[in-house]
Amino acid sequence: MRAVLQRVSEASCKVNGEITGSIEQGFLVLLGIEDADTEEDLVWLAQKIANMRVFSDENDLMNKSLADIDGRVLLISQFTLFAQTKKGNRPSFIKAARPEKAIPLYDKMILELEKLTRKKTETGVFGANMKVSLVNDGPVTIGIDTKNKE
């Protein structure tokens, strides 16, 4: 799994003009799922997201997690995180999981984040053409790959 976490002061997602998810302070998470991903990857990544300390403390240092700031998550499915761009100029997405594998893992990620944060995880709509708006706070943007745990 690959995730891009963006620390936001607000974020929302619209599908066909309707808001499907909206948060104030927290993380906008773009989540890509590949065929090789497992529930172990999912649990590890959810814990990283829930416990990532990148929110400012009273000394303006990045020491606080979502729980510390009473933050929320807006989770957006993003198969294009697995774009392969080595050949030509048109990316290949062959490594991205097909919907029959990705949707159950995406749904489990929602539940895992809700369990860890004790808050409803806001979402987009899997596979839909989404319009995502955000105010990136910092900006702080962090990429995480469960197959390359750095």
Image: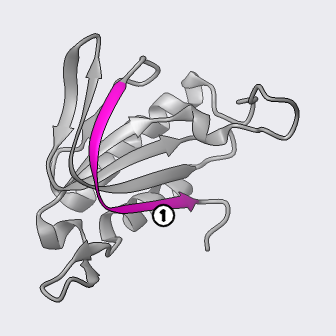
Q: Nearer the viewer, residue 63 or 103?
A: 63
Give, as a three-letter code, the residue at label 1: Trp
Q: What range of the chain is rendered magenta?
A: 131-145
In the image, residue 112 above or below residue 84:
below
Left or right of residue 123, residue 38 in this image: right
Q: Position of residue 122 (x, y in %)?
A: 23, 39
Give the left or right position of residue 137, taking residue 4 as reference. left
Quadrant where the image shows the C terminus: bottom right
Is residue 125 in sight in this rendering?
A: yes
Give the answer, above or below, for where 52 lies relative to 117.
Answer: below
Q: Tag 1: Cα neighbours inside 10 Å, few (<14), some, or many (≥20)?
A: few
Q: Say left or right for 76 vs 116.
A: right
Residue 99: x and y in percent read: 56, 23
Q: Quadrant of residue 52?
A: bottom left
Which is the main secondary structure of the residues drawn in magenta?
Answer: strand
**Residue 140 inside the magenta-drawn segment:** yes
Q: Residue at x 17, y 89 (%)?
A: 59
Residue sitting at x 88%, y 34%? 87
Occupied quadrant, residue 15: top left
Q: In which image quadrant can residue 33 be found?
A: top right
68 within the magenta span: no
Task: Tell me if residue 51 comes above or below residue 75 in the rendering.
Answer: below
Q: Position of residue 78 (x, y in %)?
A: 50, 35
Q: Which residue is mark 1?
A: 44
